Image (cartoon, grey):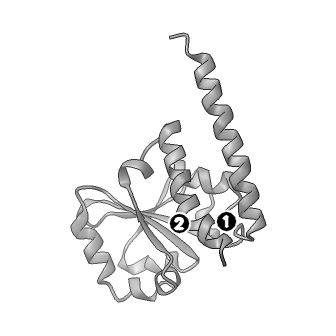
Amino acid sequence: MNRENEAQQQLDALDQRLDDLRERVAAAGLGDKPVSVLRVSPDGNRSIRVGTSESIAFRALGIAQPEAQTDPEEFRIDVSEENLDVLDGADTLFVYVDDTAEAERERIESSPLWNRLPAVQADRVHFVSSGVWNSADIIGFGNILDDIEEFFIEPGESE
């Protein structure tokens, strides 16, 4: 398609943005504040995302993930009411709800266990677009970075 130069420019811009955001994370002392990502799907399916674009973004920025959620070979960790405490290690939680699973969001938020999570108690839960956070391309990755910057880095810089 003869668009190698355009692709390289996009990759170079992404590398520069990652460098800039990584420096901001380090300067704000945010690297050791673990972040988890929870995907909510229909029929009660919930999973922590580990080997996906958003987890790659957190690792690239030097942002910690809870210890049990760091193996990039593991694509996901299924979450249920019985093991919801696996999210206890997250200082901040990003949640994306599939478009067909809005009722599941209500079910999760009404759970007494949900309200005991440290990120929930600290008001550091961010519901983000499933269309963006489920993407696997450079544009979607940039949009994930936008959310991380807006909901995690900028608030951390102002503390």
| In front: label 2 or label 1 | 2
Give the residue number, with chain letter if any, for mark 2. 151
Percent position (x, y) of residue 20? 72, 50
Q: Find numbered disc 2 in the image and state the secondary structure of the residue it sits on.
A: helix
Answer yes or no: is residue 148 visible.
yes
Which of the labelled discs sits on residue 64, or is there none? 1
Q: How far apart are marks 2 and 1 (CA)?
A: 15 Å
Quarter of the C terminus within the rendering: bottom right
Q: In which quarter of the image is residue 3?
A: top right
Q: Which of 145 and 54 is in front in this view?
A: 145
Percent position (x, y) of residue 63? 67, 62
State the residue at coordinates (24%, 65%): 102
State the residue at coordinates (78%, 65%): 27
Question: Crowding at label 2, few (<14), some or many (≥20) Cα neighbours within 10 Å?
Answer: some
Under mark 2, the amino acid is: Phe
Tell me: 154 left or right of 119: right
Percent position (x, y) of residue 156? 64, 72
Percent position (x, y) of residue 5? 63, 18
N-terminal-most mark, 2 or 1: 1
Q: Nearer the viewer, residue 138 or 153?
A: 153
